[in-house]
Every structure is written in structure tokens, then in C-alpha cells.
Amino acid sequence: MTISGNLKVIFGLSLQVPNEATIELLPNLKIVTTDSLGHFQFGGLSSGTYKLRVLDYNFKPEEFSFELKSESITELKIIVNADCEVNKKVAESDIKNGKPRLLLCGGIAPVFYSDQSKTEKKYKFEYFDFGCVSPPTECIIKYNEVIFDYFDKKYGRQWRGQVRKDIVGLK
């Protein structure tokens, strides 16, 4: 038998299919990654009680319990709320407080460009690099999009050519 379905994630006020998510099936300890449409499937199962855990988007993963009896479960709909430490509201607050940031996802060794301080002063912001432990990319994009709109209104679009190219969500 199988368990299959679809995952969606709430990012702020927006319900979205995540780019990718990891789902664990207990007690079997099977792990799958969703496809680009949020679909997932666990196969080769027997009757019993199972739990699904979405391992991304929250430090304490949500668990969904159900019983598999004599038929496969298909079209299971799972919705989780992303625990975003950065989002649209945080960006609006940062702008209001005069402390906008452009968020980056670096790695173990942060990258620093010699001219980035000059750009930060010119446009009155700070780069913030989460390093290798960052919130979900979708959360960072929601934050950065508010900052992008603010900068576009304040400076026009020329600022985009003068900032780092590794800013999450910048096109």
C-alpha cells in the first residue's frame, strides 16, 4: 500500500507549494522529498498507524497521524505554517525603524566584497548573511521583496545594479 499526497506551506499570509520539502514517515523512518508541485509518495507499506513529519520550515516539525487499513491513502493534503523569523512584517518594521537589510544565504565561510560598505552607506541598509543555517528561502524572499519595492520607490531601479548579486530573490 502507499501513502501519497500534496504539501503546501503558509508563508505569512500566502499559501504556496514549496520549492522542495523533506517529509519523514514514522515509525518506518522513510524520508522523501516533494517534487516541484508539492507531491510526495511512500510505498511498500502495510496496515498500521503512521505519522508524517514535515522536516523543513519549523524547528519543531508538525506531526500528522493517521491509520492505514486495507487501502492506500491518496490525495492526502498537508498544510504547515512556516515559522519565518523574517517575513513581510519584519521588513516593514525594519524600514519603519530605518534599518532595512538585504538578506543573503551564505555558507560556512561568509563572503565579503571590498566595496559593499560603500553601497550600504549610499543606500542606507545592511547586508545580513544567515550563513549555513538560514530560514526557508521563501521566507527570505518575502522579506527581501518588501525591501526591493521600498528601494525601487526611493531610489529608482539603479540601486539593483550596485548591490551584491547573491541577494536572495533579486532578479
Image (cartoon, helix red, strand yellow):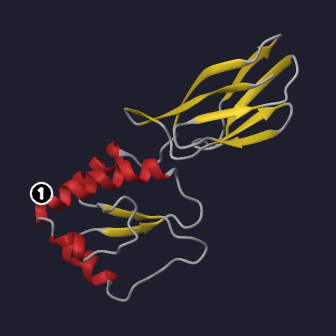
Q: Tell me residue 159's x, y (percent).
A: 19, 71
Classify the position of the C terminus by image quarter.
bottom left
Classify the position of the N terminus by image quarter.
top right
Question: At x 78% / y 12%, what residue is drawn?
Answer: 71
Residue closest to the far top: 70
Left or right: 74 with respect to 20?
Answer: right
Q: How many numbered marks does the figure carry? A: 1
Q: Is residue 51 above or below residue 154?
A: above
Q: Is residue 75 above or below residue 144?
A: above
Q: Tell me residue 65's x, y (percent).
A: 73, 20
Q: Tell me residue 101's x, y (percent).
A: 33, 62
- Judged from the image, the secondary structure of the residue bearing numbered disc 1 is helix
Q: Is residue 96 above or below residue 108?
A: above
Amino acid type indicated by mark 1 = Lys
Question: At x 27% / y 51%, what residue is drawn?
Answer: 146
Q: Quadrant of residue 164?
A: bottom left
Left or right: 36 with respect to 103?
Answer: right
Q: Quadrant of residue 157?
A: bottom left
Q: Is residue 52 above or below residue 144?
A: above
Question: At x 88% / y 21%, what residue is drawn?
Answer: 46
Tell me the crowding category of disc 1: few under 14, some 14 to 19, or many 20 or more residues within 10 angstroms, Cα based: few
Q: Quadrant of residue 3?
A: top right
Question: At x 38% / y 66%, what residue is drawn?
Answer: 167
Q: Tell me residue 41's x, y (percent).
A: 70, 32
Identify residue for label 1: 153
Left or right: 108 with respect to 66?
Answer: left
